Structures are given as structure tokens and as C-alpha cells.
Amino acid sequence: MSSAISYNAAATNSLIQNSAREQLAPSLLAARDEIFADLDLLSSGNIPAEKQPLDSGCIDLPQRLLTSESALVDRMEAAAAKFAGQVDRMLVLGIGGSYMGLRALFEALCDPCHNDLPRELRGNAPRLSFEGDNLDNDAQQALLRLLSLYKNPQELAERWGIVVISKSGGTLETAAAFRVYRKALEAYYGASSAEATELVIPVTGETGRLRDLSNTRGYQTTFPIPDGVGGRFSVFTAVGLLPAAVLGIDIRQLLQGAADITEALKTGEPGSNPVLDYVSTCHLLERDHGMDIRVLSVWGKRMEAIGLWYDQLLAESLGKHEKGATPLTVVNTRDLHSRGQQHQEGKRDRVITNVTVGSPSTADIHLPSVDASLDQDQLNRIAGKSVHELLAAAIQGTNEAYASDNRPTADIHLPKLDAYAVGQLLQMFMLATVLEGRLIGINPYGQPGVEGYKGNMGRILYGK
Ligand code: PA5
């Protein structure tokens, strides 16, 4: 495996004895066996009641897409290239698992100024706008106004299209936004124009309201979200891959990273297995020390949305039956100036997992030297150092400060922030979440608690 991500929890050794890890190992390995055995159950279609719902398809999906189902990847790439050549803005409508994975990929792997760049500096990829992730009138109006500035549907620079994503096809936020923006799109191109059906790509389950609407309206390109892959585990289906490919992200590298970390989980021993070791550390600190807040401390702005995606993954998967750790994402060094105080001196209820990157994706910026008469900021003594070196000092200094007060940290290290490493990281978190669920007896799939508010909304809006 090249440029593999690594996991190091040495800084937790004062709290976690080797013997505790060794005692946990048989249960961890049994949980690992269970999550791979779940795949056989899923494909048999014979799922016992106590296992339902079972959405374990995400575990071997990357490997399948690279081999037996590679025709689907070919089809996604072809559709993405065509769509990218037809529009200069892609609206992605979706919420929860049908939104957060793509946002994580976009922020981590596209230029941070992507939407502001001229098309040639975006690699000829369209701009990206998200909607359908809320019920926010002003946000929707702002986007409608932006779209209304486009006047010439024949000009590539003024063309836009929609990718609408909903596995169930019935999520109100997404469905309502789809109506609003579909109306705008049909008004712009003409309801009976080719664009009205060509520039809308639904990504949805095999059945459901969005599937029915797609069939009736005759959208020319649609992609399925397979049964057996849950919403927040669906980033490596067309939910994440299709729009990622439109943005020019190398989706095969994503899948390769994800497949490789899955193989590493299957074959690696505790102590040299990032997924097993991550679960072991988090679980033991929670079980033996009551540390049930999981701080994901990402050292780079581009990884914030990965953290938010992980917040959803952990909270919705394990926050059941009055169990499950609470996730919290911080972006450093920014949040050292907000939450840092509490991490250093607040309750001893958290484990901090750093996510660090070996080298920047772009050329180093070095701190310029200035004339001594203008050295009031006294930075000449570190002139020449790169921003990345300053960051490294912050990472080291912060970890040392936490260690000096016996506050546990662990590190996930990515050699580079590229598609391969991000593929590994996202799959590592999905595997770890499923594995921990099996370890603590929580079904990581499904989100029955979310139905409460939906039912009430239905009663309030539809009177039933
Ligand atoms: O993880 C999940 O299943 C949820 O977060 C869903 O992704 C979210 O509710 C959106 O559902 P849908 O894709 O059916 O619109």
C-alpha cells in the first residue's frame, strides 16, 4: 500500500495499559469477524430480526466498484464528464448522508477558492452550490437571485444544472428544494427544452417518490443508490462519486484508498491496524475513564467538512439506547483560540484525535524577512520558516501541553491530502464506527430516533 495513512496512540499509554488492550483484543477481533460476516448475511437476503436494519454494503463497496462493478464507475465518469462540459454551475440538492460526504470531498480535494476561479483554473469543472440541506428561506432566495443573474442559456458560463440526491426520495428538505430549483431551471431553459431533462441528474434508490418522479419526467441520466448501503455510509456510491467526478476528483483513487484500508482492517493485527487501534483507544478511554467526547482535531481548514461528516456518522450510528460517544470537530489552529482552553483545563471527558497532513498540496509559503526598522512584530527571528513549519510547531506544542496534564491525544496522519488518503480516511471512519457498534452491542445502521421529528412534522404539515 503506498502513502498509507497511519494511526498512533502512544500518547494515551499513561491511561491505557497494554494489558487492557490485550484483554480487549479478542472482542475486537470478534467484532471484526462479525462485520465481514454481515456481508454474507446481506447478500443472502436472509437477515435475522436482531440484525435489522443491516446496511453493511459500504464495507466491500469500494472493492466491488474497482472490480466486478467497474462498469458503474465508467458510467459515472462518462456522465460526469458530459455534465461538466454542459454547465458552469452544479446545484447539488441533498441532506445528511446525501450531502455531507460530497461536501467533505469538495472541501478537502478541490481548490479552496474553487467557486471564485475562472473555469480554466477550475480544471474546466463547474462551480458547486449546495441546497436542500435546510429549510432556510434566505439561503434559498440568495441562490435563486444568483441564478437569476444568468441571462443566456446558450453560453456555457451561464448554464447550470441540478444533481438531486435522496436515497429514500421522500426527504422533505430535498424534495421541497428540488421543486423550487426545478421550476427555476425549467423557466430558464424552457419546460420542454432538452436541457429540462438533460441537466437534472437524480441519484436515488430503486424505488420511492424521487424515482417515480424521475421516471415520469423522463430524466435522461439517473444513478441508483444501492439497497444495503445506508445514507451516511454512501459517500462511495453515486451520492458522493458522481458529483465528485463532475468536480474533477479522481474517484478511482478514492475507491482505491478505501479498498486498501478495508483490506488492512481484514488482515492486520491489533497494534498495527489503524481501524482496530482507533476503536480500541476510543473505547477503552470511554469505558475505563468516562471519556465519551470524541474530539476530531483537524489541522487544516480543508478538512473541516470531513470532521462534520464524521460528526454525523458517529452521532447517528452509535447515539442509541442512551449510549454512544459525542463527536466534536475542531479546526486548528483556529479553534485553539476558542475551545483550546477547555481541552487543556476543562473536564477530563474527552479524547482528542488529531488529523495531520505530511506536506501541503501547494508550494510552501515562507515568512518574509523585513528591514530591521519594521521588525516591531519581532518575526525576523523566524523569517524563512514556512507556514507548514509554523503549523508543525503548533501541533507539537499543543500535544505537549495536553500530555503535560495527562490529557490523551492520538494521531491520524495523512502523507498528503489527496484522493487516495481521503478515501482511506473516510473508509477508516466508517469501518471504525460499524466495528465499535458491534463491539458495544449497538446496531450502527438505521436512525430510528430521527423518525420522531419527521412524524411530528408530517402531522403538523399534512394533518396526519
Ligand atoms: O444517514 C442517513 O441515512 C441519513 O442521514 C440520510 O442520509 C438523510 O436523512 C437523507 O436521507 P435521504 O437520502 O433519503 O434523503
Image (cartoon, rainbow, N blue to C red):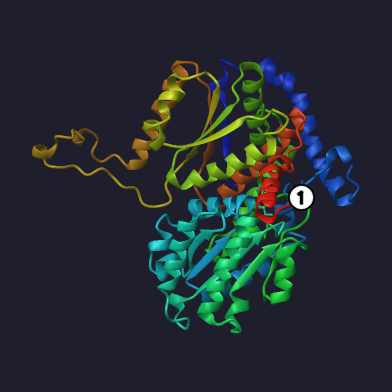
Q: Which of 306 and 447 is in front in this view?
A: 447
What residue is at 46 percent from the left and 20 percent from the top?
346
Image quarter for residue 431? top right
Examine the rendering and report whether any part of residue 259 can be seen.
no
Pick the residue in front: 93 or 38.
Answer: 93
Left or right of 275 on screen, residue 384: left
Q: Name the residue under label 1.
A: 57
Say which amino acid is labelled 1: Gly
Residue lying furthest front:
463
Asked if one can make out residue 447 in the rendered structure from this viewpoint, the answer is yes
- Return the x and y of residue 307 as percentages of the image width and height: 53, 41
Counting from the top left corner in percent of width and height, residue 206 is at: 77, 63
Q: Give the answer, above or below, for where 438 lies relative to 158.
A: above
User: Which residue is found at the position 19% from the left and 36% from the top?
Assistant: 380
Looking at the picture, does residue 372 appear above or below residue 170?
above
- Give the crowd class for mark 1: few <14, some 14-19, many >=20 residues within 10 Å: many
Instruction: Report the front residue among 182 and 457.
Output: 457
Q: Which residue lies furthest to the left in this view?
A: 373
In this rendered view, identify the residue nearer to me: 136 or 10. Answer: 136
Relative side of 308 to 319, left or right: left
